């Protein structure tokens, strides 16, 4: 079986001692930032990118991936114990998880969350392995025409599934595309919008942009809110859930995993949408929906499974097609490009060790999280006692040094400063910067493929519709955009996102 | 008293986008556009800028016609302190060295909130500066001076 061989090859990569180490570092850092509210995985990964320069590509990706799904684990710990979601994806876990903790069942809630996450992670790893092969085979048929249409679909779908107004998000995509055009044009050598700054001739670096908009702007916004920290005084006991608890949680776990896996693959998917959908589903299916919000174990198991499954399957578009599903995956693409690997449909064929190594490492990482996290709960809880007044200056400093370190250029620090100011403006006017980052990362590829497609067709735009795969992709784009204009769906979407 | 309600969030965003698009169009005005079959370097910038301009105008019109959510009040203290801290880092890192620059950055950032305690902040800044020097200069060999040159 090819699938089996691939997974075995991946496992052998993931089990190399240094890669195991990177995986462990990744999940530990991920859990830590997941526990701490106010720092998300996006600035953390941006911050750690410079560290991955000297590493092997596989090790770098394994570590960065570990941060991402580790953060989902950590986020739920804070949600259950302190009723503060460490990450947006664990908002739902607060509802029933914290209620369970109040009833003295914190240990059970934590254990169920961890087991659900592990179960989902295991299934999602298999899903990734199963879907990757046919998708990659399909991707090999892609020319510039299909690739352009796919990029358009990725950008549009990411906008639709993101929070907030569609028009605003779309405008952010275009702003990102514009920023992506900065630099020397590859085919003509003309400088575009470089302001005569030599640092800009290679294009704008996305790390300062990500750190400014996601890291610093968030810090400023956080500081405007009065600080509130409830200290946990509860001893965590009974980390082994009873048989009855497991039996109650298991069906929710399975449903959450399936839902999360499906939603994660969609462009724009990832860790935020699945838990909300899963919670709504469990509530609908329950015999007694009134238990929800009062410590229903399904309300922890389902969303936790969905969130982890979604986090992992959102790697599928990245690993098979080279299309990032969300802003975080866009950073991953950046990490690959820094390693000199061009993401795209050819990546599975050219870098099988890397791709399968990362896939297998997710399972290994999930196992690590299950084994190390429950005993370490005390440590994570004590991290919550670090006051924000000490935490944020440290983040500011590390953002500065990290940005400087990417290219040893102070220009990047100034760029980050500008992006922080703009990011703050965006928060004030209610725009999400995530689509901008996607546009920035995908912009150059979009232009390149558009140009090639036009060369191929001698300037005839109908080529995008006369090729079947491309036509289907663009039809989906059109359908999605039309659907967004229909008032009924707009209302449904708003409800789904605010619930 | 029926002043027309405005959506300031839309208006500001629209203004911002129009300004960016206009700037981009102006800066790329000399680049050749070419044709679709043989695109010049100015083709994509113009397409994208025009789209941005369209979005900006759309938000301006929409903002002028409907009332919207109010903008949350801006607190200048955290904005200025954090931006200033970053700026000072950029100004001093290569001249005064990482050690001094880090201390200054952390201290300035601390001004962002009233909760900061002076003595604690100074001690913490020194500790962080030491950690940063150890991590970035010793371990990662970042080519930045540690002390003033």
Image (spheres, rainbow, N blue to C red):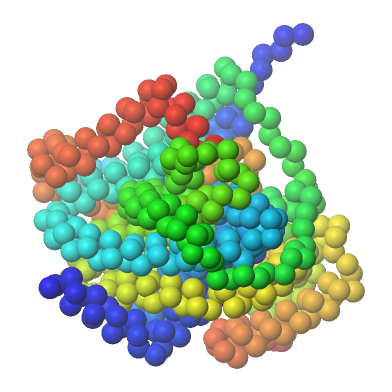
Quick check: A227 left or right of A374? right
From the viewer's side, name the closer residue of A89 and A176.
A89
From the viewer's side, name the closer residue of A92 and B57.
A92
Is any atom of residue A215 visible in this view? no
Q: Quadrant of residue B53?
A: top left
Q: Count all numbered tags in the image, as a single digit.
A: 0
> Where in the figure is residue A116, as x and y percent of width and height?
46, 62
Q: In which quarter of the image is residue B135?
A: bottom right
Residue shown at the point (36%, 67%) measured from the top left: A122
From the viewer's side, name the closer residue of B66 and B85.
B66
Image quarter of the N terminus of chain A: bottom left
Residue shown at the point (40%, 27%) measured from the top left: A489
Is the residue B64 above or below the residue A57 in the image?
above
Is any atom of residue A83 visible in this view? yes
Q: In which quarter of the image is residue A315?
A: bottom left
From the viewer's side, name the closer residue of A458 and A301.
A301
> Where in the figure is residue B123, as x and y percent of width and height?
83, 79
> Where in the figure is residue A439, as x and y percent of width and height?
40, 50
> Where in the figure is residue A422, as x and y percent of width and height?
60, 48
Residue shown at the point (75%, 38%) measured from the top left: B73
Residue shown at the point (45%, 33%) measured from the top left: A493
Image quarter of the C terminus of chain A: top right
Q: Which residue lies furthest to the top in this view?
A: B1
Is the residue B44 above or below the residue A61 in the image?
above
């Amino acid at each position: 079986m090819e699938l089996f061989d691939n997974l075995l090859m991946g496992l052998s990569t993931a089990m190399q001692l240094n890669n195991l180490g990177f995986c462990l570092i990744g999940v530990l850092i991920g859990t830590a930032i997941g526990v701490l509210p106010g720092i998300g995985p996006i600035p953390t990964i941006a911050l750690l990118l410079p560290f991955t320069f000297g590493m092997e590509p596989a090790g770098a990706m394994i570590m960065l991936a570990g941060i991402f799904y580790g953060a989902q684990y950590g986020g739920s710990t804070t949600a259950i114990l302190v009723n503060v979601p460490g990450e947006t994806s664990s908002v739902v876990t607060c509802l029933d998880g914290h209620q369970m903790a109040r009833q003295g069942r914190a240990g059970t809630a934590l254990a169920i969350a961890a087991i659900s996450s592990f179960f989902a992670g295991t299934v999602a790893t298999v899903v990734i392995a199963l879907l990757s092969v046919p998708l990659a085979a399909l991707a090999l048929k892609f020319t510039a025409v299909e690739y352009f249409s796919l990029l358009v679909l990725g950008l549009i779908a990411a906008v639709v599934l993101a929070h907030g107004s569609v028009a605003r998000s779309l405008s952010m995509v275009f702003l990102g595309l514009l920023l992506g055009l900065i630099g020397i044009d590859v085919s003509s050598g003309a400088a575009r919008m470089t302001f005569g700054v030599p640092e800009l001739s290679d294009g704008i670096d996305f790390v300062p942009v990500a750190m400014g908009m996601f890291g610093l702007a968030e810090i400023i916004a956080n500081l405007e809110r009065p600080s509130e920290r409830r200290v946990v005084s509860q001893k965590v006991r009974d980390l082994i859930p009873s048989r009855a608890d497991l039996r109650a949680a298991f069906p929710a776990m399975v449903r959450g995993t399936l839902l999360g896996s499906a939603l994660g693959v969609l462009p724009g998917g990832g860790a935020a949408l699945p838990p909300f959908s899963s919670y709504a589903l469990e509530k609908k299916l329950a015999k007694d929906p009134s238990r929800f919000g009062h410590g229903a174990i399904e309300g922890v198991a389902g969303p936790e499974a969905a969130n982890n499954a979604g986090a992992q399957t959102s790697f599928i578009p990245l690993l098979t097609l080279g299309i990032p599903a969300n802003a975080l995956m866009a950073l991953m693409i950046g990490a690959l490009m820094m390693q000199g690997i061009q993401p795209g449909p050819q990546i599975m064929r050219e870098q099988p060790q890397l791709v399968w190594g990362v896939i297998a490492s997710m399972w290994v990482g999930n196992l690590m999280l299950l084994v190390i996290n429950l005993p370490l709960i005390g440590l994570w809880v004590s991290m919550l006692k670090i006051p924000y007044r000490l935490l944020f200056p440290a983040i500011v400093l590390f953002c500065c040094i990290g940005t400087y370190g990417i290219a040893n250029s102070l220009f990047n620090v100034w760029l980050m400063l500008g992006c922080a100011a703009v990011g703050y403006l965006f928060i004030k006017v209610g725009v999400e910067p995530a689509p901008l980052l996607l546009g920035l990362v995908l912009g150059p590829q979009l232009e390149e493929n558009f140009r090639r497609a036009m060369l191929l067709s001698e300037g005839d735009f109908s080529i995008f519709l006369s090729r079947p795969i491309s036509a289907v992709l663009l039809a989906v784009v059109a359908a999605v955009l039309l659907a967004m204009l229909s008032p009924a769906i707009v209302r449904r979407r708003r409800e789904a996102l605010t619930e | 008293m029926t002043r027309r309600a405005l959506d300031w969030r839309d208006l500001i965003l629209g203004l911002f986008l129009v300004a960016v698009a206009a700037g981009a169009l102006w800066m790329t005005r000399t680049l050749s556009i070419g044709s679709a079959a043989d695109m010049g370097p100015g083709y994509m910038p113009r397409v994208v800028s025009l789209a941005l301009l369209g979005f900006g105008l759309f938000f301006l019109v929409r903002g002028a016609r409907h009332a919207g959510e109010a903008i949350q009040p801006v607190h200048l203290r955290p904005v200025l302190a954090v931006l200033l801290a970053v700026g000072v880092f950029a100004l001093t890192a290569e001249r005064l060295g990482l050690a001094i620059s880090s201390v200054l950055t952390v201290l300035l950032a601390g001004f962002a909130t009233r909760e900061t305690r002076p003595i604690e902040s100074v001690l913490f800044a020194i500790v962080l500066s030491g950690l940063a020097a150890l991590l970035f200069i010793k371990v990662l060999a970042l080519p930045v001076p540690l002390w003033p040159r």
